[in-house]
Image (cartoon, rainbow, N blue to C red):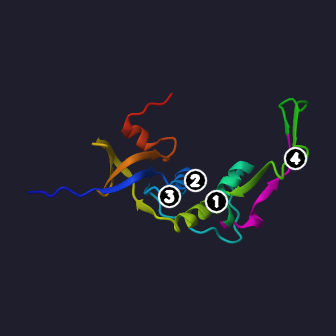
Amino acid sequence: MARTAEALHTEVAIVGGGLVGMAAAIALARQGLQVTLIDSQSAPPAPEPFAWDSRIYAITPGNKQWLESQGVWQRMDASRICSVDRMHVRGDDQHALLAFDAYEASLPSLSFILENRQLQDALWSRAGELDIRILPGHLDGLMRSGVATRLRLGDGTLLDAQLVIAADGGQSTVRQLAGVGIT
């Protein structure tokens, strides 16, 4: 007689360990929820000290404050973050102009420019301090199981979760397996 595999249990399962998935995992774990993150990649390699990442983000002051409150912002190298104090945006005809100035708006900065690898490294570093279970692998199946949703990973691991968060990108496997359409 074949033995049925015992499922792991979690309150929240997050599929996808990119910026969105990892930030959600940190925030939810800090709220006291039991979080399991499923990602096909392990932690990204630490950024090389002198290599610049061409993939960058503009982070709003509100998002900076949120990342600080989660203990993430402080982990990034401040010398690699650039504050944006003024911005000029021109239209196609070169006559239309929008100008933004932090000083005139009574703001310390309009935004902050930072590298993807710096932010990813800071998120993974912070997650390592929290009680977040990280399962390497890819999602292979998704089905309702009583009051939970059962996730099946490619290696056969089963996970029962009360909430599943799809943070696995535009071609979301979670969305496809759940039958959620998009327009």
Q: Count residues near mark 2 (Cα–Cα under 10 Å), then give few for <14, some for 14-19, many for 20+.
A: some
Given residues 7 and 50, the one toward you in this image is 7
First in residue order: circle 2 vs circle 4: 2
* For residue 149, side relative to residue 25 (left or right): left
Find residue 29 and name its label: 3
Structural crowding at the residue carrying mark 3, measured as other residues with C-alpha within 10 Å and reported as few (<14), some (14–19) or many (≥20): some
Label 1 with label 2: CB-CB less than 8 Å: yes
Nearer-N-terminus badge (4/1)? 4
Mark 3 element type: helix
Q: In whole angstroms, how far apart are the C-alphas of marks 4 and 1?
A: 27 Å
Residue position for label 1: 119
Q: Earlier in the sequence, mark 3 or mark 4?
A: 3
Type of amino acid under label 2:
Leu
* Residue position marked by numbered label 4 in the rendering: 106
Horizontal and vertical percent for residue 112? Answer: 76, 53
- Disc 3 residue type (three-letter): Ala
Determine the residue positioned at 61% across, 59% down: 70
Residue 19: which disc? 2
Residue span colored magenta: 75-88
Question: In the image, which is nearer the foreground, mark 2 or mark 4?
Answer: 4
Residue 7 in view (yes/no): yes
